[in-house]
């Protein structure tokens, strides 16, 4: 290998190294900007409080042990008396609830469900699942068996959560 070829080889390695460093820097910058925090979720809750409350009020009025939204369809729910019981798909009969679910869905709360003592609003985050806002229906700390972090908001019964 001649000196000129060696010099080109070193330049190529140097360029690839710079591109890698820039790529890692951009990735870290993007990650830092979107790290979910209790404060970010509580502020979002306060902005969208009426929508969250409409869904909770609807869930309180029903005897279902478990329900969840059908992905992308905010007019129907999968309802069960028990979590693994037979499914019944029902049409939501209240326009305000349909509007609330649609608005929350458009704000990336794509997985909304009631399980036992709580209504869970799971936010679709590109780098992790199982994060969002939860409301306790009976005043006890919500637990779906997967919660790693649970931090109360200033508003009684509302929490920020992250799954393990």
Image (cartoon, rainbow, N blue to C red):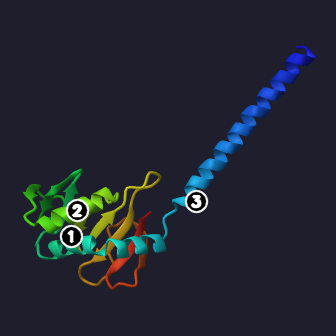
How packed mark 2 is, by other alpha carbons closer than 10 Å (few <14, some 14-19, many 20 or more), is: many
Can I make out residue 37 in this image?
yes
Pointer 1: what residue? 55
Residue 150: image location, x then y, percent = 42, 74
Of callouts 1 and 2, the N-terminal one:
1
Residue at image x 78%, y 30%?
Answer: 13
Toward the viewer: 114 or 103?
Answer: 103
Instruction: Name the element at disc 1.
Output: helix
Of the 4 image quadrants, the one containing the N terminus is top right
Q: Quadrant of the C terminus?
A: bottom left
Residue at point 43%, 77% (across, down): 151
* The disc label shown at residue 119, or none: none
The numbered mark at residue 101 is 2
Q: Position of residue 149 (x, y in %)?
A: 45, 71
On the image, numbered disc 3 is attached to which residue?
32
User: For this view, does 87 lie left or right of residue 102?
Assistant: left
């Amino acid at each position: 290998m001649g000196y000129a070829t060696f010099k080109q080889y070193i330049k190529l390695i140097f360029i690839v190294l710079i591109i890698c460093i820039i790529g890692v820097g951009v990735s870290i910058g993007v990650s830092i900007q979107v790290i979910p925090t209790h404060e970010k979720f509580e502020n979002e809750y306060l902005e969208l409080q009426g929508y969250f409350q409409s869904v909770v009020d609807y869930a309180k009025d029903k005897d279902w042990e478990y329900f969840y939204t059908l992905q992308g369809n905010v007019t129907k729910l999968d309802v069960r008396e028990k979590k693994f019981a037979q499914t019944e798909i029902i049409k939501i009969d209240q326009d305000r609830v349909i509007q609330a679910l649609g608005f929350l869905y458009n704000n990336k709360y794509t997985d909304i469900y009631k399980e036992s003592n709580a209504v869970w609003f799971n936010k679709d985050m590109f780098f992790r699942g199982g994060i969002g806002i939860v409301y306790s229906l009976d005043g006890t700390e919500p637990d779906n068996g997967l919660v790693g972090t649970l931090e109360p908001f200033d508003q009684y019964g509302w929490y920020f959560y992250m799954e393990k």
